[in-house]
Image (spheres, rainbow, N blue to C red):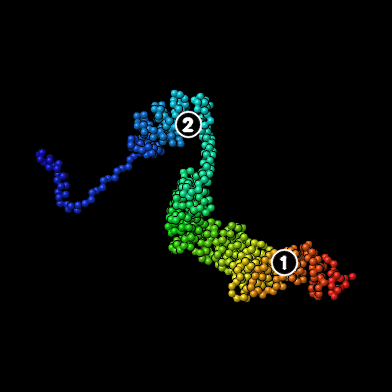
Amino acid sequence: MRIGKVLKSSAPFFVAGLCAWFTPRAPAISQVDPAPAKAPPTDESLLFAPETPRADRDSAADRLLASSDWNSSRTVLSALDSASPAAARVAILRAIARSPFAPGTYWNAVAAAAYVAPAEELPETLAAVASFRSRVAAQLLTGFLEAPHPVPVRDAAQAGLVRLTGRADLPTAQKSWNQWLAEMAPLSERQWQAEVIRGIAGRNDALRRERQTMVTRLVESQREFWLTLREADARERFLASLLRDELDELKRLGIDLTRQAVATGERPGAEVAAAAIELLASPRAAMRAEGAKLVNQLAPEGAGPAVVAALNAETDPRAAEALLAALRRWPSRDAEPAILHWLDRGGSSTAFAADACLAMERNGLLTDAEMRIRVLTALRAADSRDLQSPGMRLLTLLGDDTDFARVEALLTSGGDASLRAAAAEAVATDPRYGDALIRAAAKDPSLLGAAVRNLSANRATLDGLRALLAAVPADSPPALLALAQLAAAAPLTDVLAFAGDESLDPRLREAALGTIAPRPLPEGPDELRQAVARGLLLLAELRLKLLRPDAALAATDAADQIENSPIDDQELADLRSTALLLAGRFDEVGRLSGSSASWMNAMELAIDEPATLFIAEDFDRRFAHSLEGDELSRYSEIRQRLGLPPLDRVWGPEALAVDAPG
């Protein structure tokens, strides 16, 4: 029977053995199975283990205190017990002291610790007491303000009371604090909390002002120190240290100084560039935005991948806009998802994303058909105010006739000048929009510059000059300047043909002709050089009509310098004489052999000017005795217009003398 029991109890092992015997064996594995991974330590073990570094122990204490788990609360209470290891207890006290408002669950344990803690632990314990924000906590702290407690303990109690109540104005004396607490005794709990909040708020404001004053002094001292640095390496290290500083104010100083250095021709090196790139990972969106702008300005080699990576992770619109602006310098297909995201998001980011797309298009990277369709879809759905010039430009590049018409309509949008300006800027170089820009500029002169840019790039011809007249009023100096800008880009022959049209206002003709004088003399056949000389003479005549004698003299000087000029000396002398008379330079006129006609031209042009009477007096002495026929009739008419008596030539030479009238 005993044998049977043994067999019965051994049956499972026997069967297993048979199965193992008849089951084919798996091939042997040569490598040794890896040991199971060691489980990470728990916060409780980190808190109590003697070998845990202080930083790790404090982190574990923070996590335990922040947890709502019952086991975590039990661990915290266990650590606060006087029998627990001192390192664990002090770590929990420090965590409570770091808490802005400690949970009431731990009040009894912390209060008990304050009465039994050794002197060396009391500062941390009293700091933890201050985190409970209650009257009882304040009363407990007042008990440690005076002897026999050592100075560090008393200082910790005073600091805890100030932190708890915000009353930094009360002296470090138990009597003063007890008196204040007695005044607060009638207050309800809500009133007490309101009083504490008021005190803390006032204290925070005072500390903020103190901090700002200190930071301002620090920034100014660092700025002054920067001015003392002369060696390039020292300046490089200093800028990099500012950009990497934990204080935002010093980071901004580093950004400002770096920009100033670049503006003055200094080129920061690799260390500053690396520090600027590190700003892209700043926890503050404003600093990431400034970092992106600085990286864009410095343009360090190899910064493209960092910009793309930062953009793909960015969630703040301001920082994204700065990164999108930087992406124009480093276009990349890897940024397509981020570009589409900010395009679809709308708002001011749309224009920045569109500008990044334009950079990709210019660099031949916007080739994927699906990407182009998605971009075009987003642009069509966007508000025109969000598109701005980059979005409108991209719309005209990717879109069809409907999109063309949409942008063209924006050029004449009523009431919204900024929208018209954005549309004009978007199509300022597009040849399809030349006529539309001229029509728009005729209604809104502020668009004239875009129209001129378009014509200068695509139609700087006689036809373009004549087309621009629809938007150029002759009495508008900015419009005349715009005409001159287009004429400067047109061939000389077209400018001369335009200015030769006598049906045009002299001011328009003069504005166009004024562009030929600064040009170098044309090479080639004499016919063109002679045409230029004639054009300069015409320019002088037009300027005389416009009473611009000094400018007319400059035109005659330029004409006189042309070799093989078809202009004779008398023609030049007459023009110069008229110009000198109009300019009041009478002494110089005498050195020229100007004809009487040139003098009469001057008098007719300046008939309403007082100085014309002096010209007439000098004319009488020079020419009156020799006038005959048409010249005499012309001068008599001039005298009549000047209000002078009829010409008396009795004094003239006997052969030409005539009787005085009457």
Residue beneath the point at 11% across and 41% down: 4
Q: Amino acid at mark 2?
A: Ala
Q: Quadrant of residue 612?
A: bottom right
Q: Nearer the viewer, residue 311 or 315?
A: 311
Residue beneath the point at 34% across and 39% down: 42
Q: Nearer the viewer, mark 1 or mark 2?
A: 1
Q: Which residue is mark 2?
A: 159
Q: Position of residue 657 (x, y in %)?
A: 85, 73
**Is residue 530 shown above or below 18?**
below
View extreme (right): residue: 662
Q: Nearer the viewer, residue 494 or 197?
A: 494
**Is residue 98 shown above or below 488?**
above
For the N terminus, the quadrant is: top left
Q: Position of residue 394 (x, y in %)?
A: 51, 62
**Is residue 445 shown above or below 254?**
below
Q: Which mark is residue 579?
A: 1
The answer to whether one can see residue 321 in this image is: no
Q: Earlier in the sequence, mark 1 or mark 2?
A: 2
**Is residue 478 shown above or below 135?**
below
Q: Nearer the viewer, residue 224 or 338?
A: 224
The answer to whether one can see residue 95 in this image is: yes
Q: Quadrant of residue 69?
A: top left
Residue beneath the point at 84% across and 73% down: 653
- Gap in Å between the C-alphas at discs 1 and 2? 89 Å
Around disc 2, counting alpha carbons within 10 Å, would you say few (fewer than 14), some (14 to 19), or many (20 or more)? some
In this image, 417 relative to 269: left or right?
Answer: right
Q: Amino acid at mark 1?
A: Ala
In this image, 627 relative to 529: left or right?
Answer: right
Around disc 1, counting alpha carbons within 10 Å, would you say few (fewer than 14), some (14 to 19), or many (20 or more)? many
